[in-house]
Image (tube, rainbow, N blue to C red):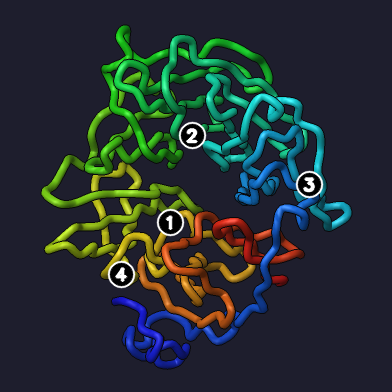
Amino acid sequence: MSYHRNFNNTLAIWAAFGGRGELILPIPTLSWQRKYYNDFGYTQYGSERQINVYDNGNAQVAVYYAKTPYMSYFNKSTGEWTVVDVPWWSYGQPEILYAGDGVFLAKIVGLANIIASFDGITWHNAGYCQGAQNSMTTGAYDSSIGSGVVSWWYYKSPVYYSFDSLTERTAWTLVGADGSSVPIFSYMTTHKGRFVGVVGGDRSIAAASTSSPGSWSTTIPEDLNTYYMYVRSVHDKLFVMKYRYVSGIFHVNLCVMNDSATKLTETNLSHVGDLANNNIPNPENIIWMEDWGKYALFNESMLYVSADGLTWEGVEQPGFTTTNSDTFGGAIYVPGDGFYVKASGYVYYAPY
């Protein structure tokens, strides 16, 4: 069911869903404000303003997309964002490939090194991908067995894996002798002993056991006019965005996959229109709120919540809006501080 602004009060939404679940009146209408690079302790570098926020379950970072040797992490002792020296970023812009399971996996744009951290403060050169070409696109990590993968946007070097320590610079292993025996991935996540990814081209989904990351299989094959984006595992649920392009219009659904990533179930959140629209239900913007015992999802002027990841109910958030063609691209919650949601050039913040 698509969101409409004339249908945005909590009671109406709950009634429209047949009164299922608990009425969500305790879920707050938050007070939103914009924060910029300087609010996270950074000094501007060139014309760059972009801040991205990530949470690995234990630590939170605010990453400034610029060639500057610092990283900002949330200091739980002081309750402040604090910058620390990270000389790696002197070589290029940092990008986080994966945040979860107590690990951050990052890259330096243009280089073949994997940079890792557990706390957002100390960052290690965790390895390199010998012979890799073009751009490292995504990655995932399973802390339970110390297994990691990264994917590259090039048909001769798509996936490398490692079981080595993230604190040592070791060579990651290319899957397949010629580097073309597994797909390229646009998005990856880790879910209950599997690496799950949206295959490059966004037409299918593939998975591998985290204990055997050299052996991948297609779990959801290509289907006419069906595409996928933003696969993420959040609190034991595997989310993905599915869309179809029909007669020049995008039809978007938030979906939950089963644990083996072989079956999709559509949720009640959908959008019809342009993909560059902040009303799309993007799994990047889903978090698990332990205090509420519910999932939370942010999009244009709305906070949605769900107990099971399938049925969502919404509360309007005045002032929580973007400009045309801008979309939220990542949400985190810092306990005792508040919510942070990434937009272009700034981050929305609401104390809670």
Q: Residues within 10 Å of mark 3 (few under 14, many from 20)?
A: few
Which of disc 4 and disc 3 is earlier in sequence? 3
Kind of residue at disc 2:
Ala
Kind of residue at disc 4:
His
Q: Secondary structure at mark 1?
A: helix
Q: Secondary structure at mark 4?
A: strand
Tell me the distance, in whole angstroms, between the alpha carbons under discs 2 and 3. 30 Å
Which of disc 4 and disc 1 is earlier in sequence? 4
Label ID, residue 271? 4
- Relative to 256, 237 lies left or right: right
Residue 247 position in % (x across, y down): 12, 63
Which of disc 3 and disc 1 is earlier in sequence? 3
Q: Nearer the viewer, residue 284 or 56?
A: 284
Q: Tell me whether circle 1 and circle 3 mark residues in contact (CB < 8 Å).
A: no
Label ID, residue 126? none
Kind of residue at disc 3:
Thr
Residue 241 position in % (x across, y down): 33, 55
Tell me the distance, in whole angstroms, between the alpha carbons under discs 1 and 4. 14 Å
Which of disc 3 and disc 2 is earlier in sequence? 3
Q: Tell me whether circle 1 and circle 4 mark residues in contact (CB < 8 Å).
A: no
Q: Which residue is mark 3?
A: 43
Q: Which residue is mark 2?
A: 140
Tell me the distance, in whole angstroms, between the alpha carbons under discs 3 and 4. 38 Å
Furthest toward the right, the residue is 78
Label ID, residue 283? 1
Residue 199 position in % (x across, y down): 29, 36
